[in-house]
């Protein structure tokens, strides 16, 4: 099996998940969870990690973090390695605790930090563990809204600052933002991940490839590189969409959306093909996404085009589930 693609650079943001081997429990007791938080703390002091969000579930965990020193591998070796030793010694166990290596997606924080933090914080509610997100102790959400004391190693300022400089106001606005999804079905922001590796707009993807992957772009041992190389030409997307979608207006809208999310082209180049500017590309693509939930036929057409283009790993129908 090919190796996973690792992108590391100073200041990078990541969504990281790690699951128990064979989906077995990795947190069985309160002391397990407290000990894991100790390793999150030491990751910040020893390796400079900035942990913005966390959520510990029964058999996996989520982190949204930043690496000022470009050392994600070192940070994760510490967290998963130290916790595995603790777990095995405590239970007289030997062998793997986690299912392979952790999964890390490099994130364009300016575009996705809010959506991603909300996705992480709603995990316990999605799983039916609690009736309200602030009731879950093993998650950073209570610290965000001020119902629990913030651990000194948890950085809530980055996300909350997107709602303004006043902490009280920002907390209330963030709470409204998160809890607005309760009772609704919504798509995970992770469905927009490119090649299971990069979550960001087309310009961000291009920058990551140019600055951090070009020397390795022909490596045959990393499947994600092949997926990045296999991005679609705008002309092919437009042609295939008009071939499969009968109604011209809808075909144009679907083509704009797929170009925006999957071509890897810059917004300027995409807009040039459709006769409008950069911002109009994003707005048109977003408008179509909003219609996905109410008009399932549109989602089906997008998936039909993606399948015809050969984008087997694109899952536009992947959902976070209904939030009760």
Image (tube, rainbow, N blue to C red):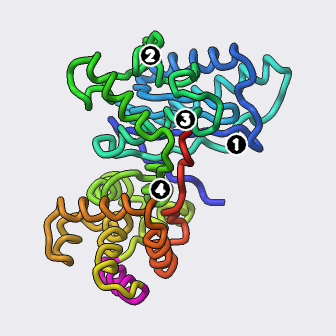
Which residue is depicted at the point 29% across and 16% down?
A: 168
Q: Nearer the viewer, mark 3 or mark 1?
A: 3
Q: Is residue 36 visible?
A: yes
Please give the label number shown on residue 191.
4
Q: Is residue 181 above or below residue 256?
A: above
Q: Which mark is residue 153?
A: 2
What secondary structure characterizes most of the magenta part? helix
Do the residues under discs 1 and 2 have CB atoms within 8 angstroms? no
Q: Position of residue 210 (x, y in %)?
A: 30, 58
Q: Which residues are magenta?
A: 233-244
Q: Is residue 157 magenta?
A: no
Tell me residue 167's x, y (percent): 27, 17
Disc 3 crowd rating (10 Å Cα; few below 14, some 14-19, many 20+) is: many
Give the alpha-carbon distance from disc 2 to disc 3, as whole Å. Answer: 16 Å
Distance CA(mark 3)–CA(mark 1): 14 Å
Label 1 crowding class (10 Å Cα cut-off): few <14, some 14-19, many 20+? some
Instruction: Name which residue lies at 33% across and 35% down.
Output: 11
User: Of helix, strand and loop, which one carries label 4?
Assistant: helix
Give the left or right position of residue 275, taking residue 171 as reference.
left
- Name the residue beneath numbered marker 1: 99
Pair 4/3: label in front: 4
Q: Nearer the viewer, residue 178 or 34?
A: 178
Q: Are marks 4 and 3 in contact (CB under 8 Å)?
A: no
Q: Which residue is mark 3?
A: 62
């Amino acid at each position: 099996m090919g190796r996973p693609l690792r992108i590391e650079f100073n200041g990078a943001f990541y969504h990281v998940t790690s699951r128990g081997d064979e989906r077995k429990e990795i947190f069985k007791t309160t002391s397990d969870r407290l000990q894991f938080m100790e390793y999150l703390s030491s990751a910040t002091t020893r390796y400079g990690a900035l942990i913005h969000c966390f959520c510990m579930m029964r058999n996996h965990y989520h982190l949204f973090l930043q690496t000022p020193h470009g050392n994600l591998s070192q940070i994760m070796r510490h967290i998963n390695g130290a916790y595995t030793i603790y777990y095995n010694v405590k239970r007289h166990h030997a062998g793997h605790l986690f299912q392979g290596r952790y999964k890390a997606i490099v994130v364009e924080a300016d575009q996705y930090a809010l959506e991603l933090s909300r996705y992480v914080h709603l995990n316990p509610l999605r799983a039916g563990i609690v009736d309200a997100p602030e009731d879950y102790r093993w998650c950073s959400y209570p610290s965000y809204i001020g119902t629990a004391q913030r651990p000194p190693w948890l950085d809530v300022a980055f996300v909350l600052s997107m709602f303004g400089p006043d902490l009280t106001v920002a907390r209330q606005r963030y709470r409204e933002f998160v809890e607005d999804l309760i009772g609704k079905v919504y798509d995970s922001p992770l469905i927009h991940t490119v090649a299971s590796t990069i979550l960001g707009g087309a310009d961000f993807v291009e920058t990551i490839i140019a600055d951090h992957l070009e020397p390795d772009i022909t490596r045959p041992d990393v499947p994600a590189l092949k997926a990045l190389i296999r991005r679609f030409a705008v002309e092919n997307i437009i042609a295939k969409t008009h071939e499969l979608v009968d109604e011209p207006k809808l075909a144009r809208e679907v083509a704009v959306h797929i170009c925006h999310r999957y071509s890897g082209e810059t917004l300027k180049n995409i807009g040039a093909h459709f006769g409008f500017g950069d911002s109009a590309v994003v707005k048109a693509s977003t408008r179509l996404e909003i219609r996905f939930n109410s008009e399932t036929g549109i989602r089906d057409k997008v998936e039909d085009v993606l399948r015809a283009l050969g984008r087997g790993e694109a899952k536009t129908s992947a959902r976070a589930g209904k939030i009760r």
